[in-house]
Image (cartoon, helix red, strand yellow):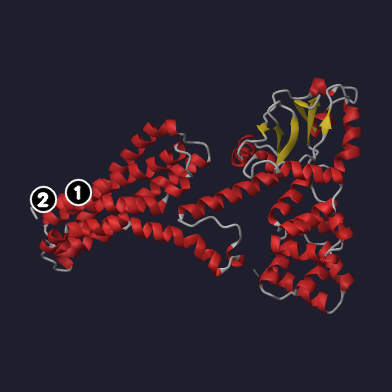
Amino acid sequence: MPELEMKMNEIMEMLRSKRYQDLRDHLDNMNPADIAEALEALTDDEQITPEELVRLYRLIPKDLAADTFIEMNPDMQETLISAFSDKELHDIIDDMYLDDTVDIIEEMPANVVSRILKNVDPDTRANINQILKYPEDSAGSIMTIEYVDLKPEQTVWDAFTVIRASGVDKETIYTCYVTDRRKLVGIVTVRELLLASYEDRIGDIMETNVISVNTLDDKEEVAQTLAKYDFTAVPVVDKEDRLVGIVTVDDAIDVMTEEATEDIEKMAAITPSEHPYLRSSVFEIWKQRIPWLLLLMVSATFTGMIITKFESALAAQVALTAFIPMLMDTGGNSGSQASVTIIRGISLGDIEFSDIIDVVWKEARVAVLCGAVLACTTFLKIMLVDRMLMGNNDVTMTVAAVVCITLVFTVFIAKLVGCTLPLFAKKLGFDPAVMASPFITTIVDALSLMIYMNVATMLLGI
């Protein structure tokens, strides 16, 4: 990107010419995410040494430093932490929100984690350890405890006093949470506070119909809750309805991005990676891919066994061989279309296992329509191109009929396999994404060949 390259060049020119004040002023006009992106690009291109990275980071204005640090990748964060003095590390962690600190700790090696925990306040350390105890994929693991807490008996004036006194350290102040003996009893927004009289009690203006999530709820479901209700934050309660934290929309976006990436990798038969592609080693990428390739290669031997079984039939009618790739590809593509649609519906919560009858009925009708159109098109193509234009007299009307009938049945079965496997996988507790293209293609390939050979045997008498 030209704009990013220009930023990188400007930053490095000022750093190496020791124009530190100009560089500080330049960084002060940049967004923390843009600074982190530029530094990451410089690091990836090996245009900046670790020593220069540390020197450059120390020139970032104090009010941007913590936010920039959060946006950096774990490798850069580890480099900086190793170079920080204890005071610098304490100041950075102190300027960060608790959930961001926990995210960083989860990515760091044990020796770095020990140093971070040694340089935080005892209360912060206790809160970090508490959040780290929650399961990795739970709401508790991504929540923050930095929210505005009000009481029902307080007035609007009291609420503004609380917000002014503590709001600077809270991740969000737009939505305030009302608790009574730690139990969540309502919420009130700053908009409602601004429109109310100073004498009004919080208990009289708060919304009591509160949507919340549990600490052990799956974080993907929490993200879906935020998306469904257009919340900027959702409260997290324990099993006794006591408010223990909130999940904000920025964390939900991170979760949705991670889950989407993981599903895409699984659908492509790749073990999910913890690192971006360019920062993954060749050996790491090999480990992610080779187990699935071996499994799919072994499972594909069934296709070879079917071809071997009907070898004499293919030898008697050689023209049939030319259509095998087309039939297998069409079946695999048909199954993939259905599976991807169903997996997306499952991920969004639109489709449940109880909907399987409706799903099968819909896909069956789609399969009939698709199969009919493909069969008619294929018949015309075979008769016009293969027989007339290419002069292949072995391609008879009967051969064309065999191919078209097989095509209809293949598409039909592929659609049914593609729509049901992810649902059964979900029901059995497996990830539906695993049942995407590779597995379905392998299954459909074998089924399409069996159909093809049996139809050919019946119609051609081979």
Looking at the image, which residue sits at the far bottom? Answer: 17
Task: In the rendered structure, find residue 459 and report the number of the disc placed on it.
Answer: 2
Looking at the image, which residue sits at the far top? Answer: 204
Q: Amino acid at mark 2?
A: Leu
Residue at (67% x, 29% y) in the render = 211
139, 448: nearer the viewer: 139
Residue at (26% x, 51% y) in the render = 448
> Tag 2, which secondary structure?
helix
Q: Position of residue 184 (x, y in %)?
A: 75, 27
Task: In the rendered structure, find residue 405 and report the number of the disc placed on it.
Answer: 1
Q: Amino acid at mark 1?
A: Ile
Label 1 Cα crowd, 10 Å radius (few <14 / some 14-19 / many 20+):
some
Q: Position of residue 354 (x, y in %)?
A: 43, 30
On screen, residue 3 versus residue 57, left or right, reads left
Quarter the C terminus occupies: bottom left
**Distance CA(mark 2)–CA(mark 1):** 10 Å
Quarter the N terminus occupies: bottom right
On screen, residue 60 versus residue 72, left or right, reads right
Q: Which badge, 2 or 1, is on the more N-terminal residue? A: 1
Q: Are marks 2 and 1 in contact (CB under 8 Å)?
A: yes
Does the rendering let one see residue 256?
yes
Looking at the image, which residue sits at the far left? Answer: 461
> Tag 1, which secondary structure?
helix
Does the rendering let one see residue 73?
no
The mark lying in front, picked from 2 and 1, is 2
133, 306: nearer the viewer: 133
Task: In the rendered structure, find residue 136 and report the number of the disc placed on it.
Answer: none
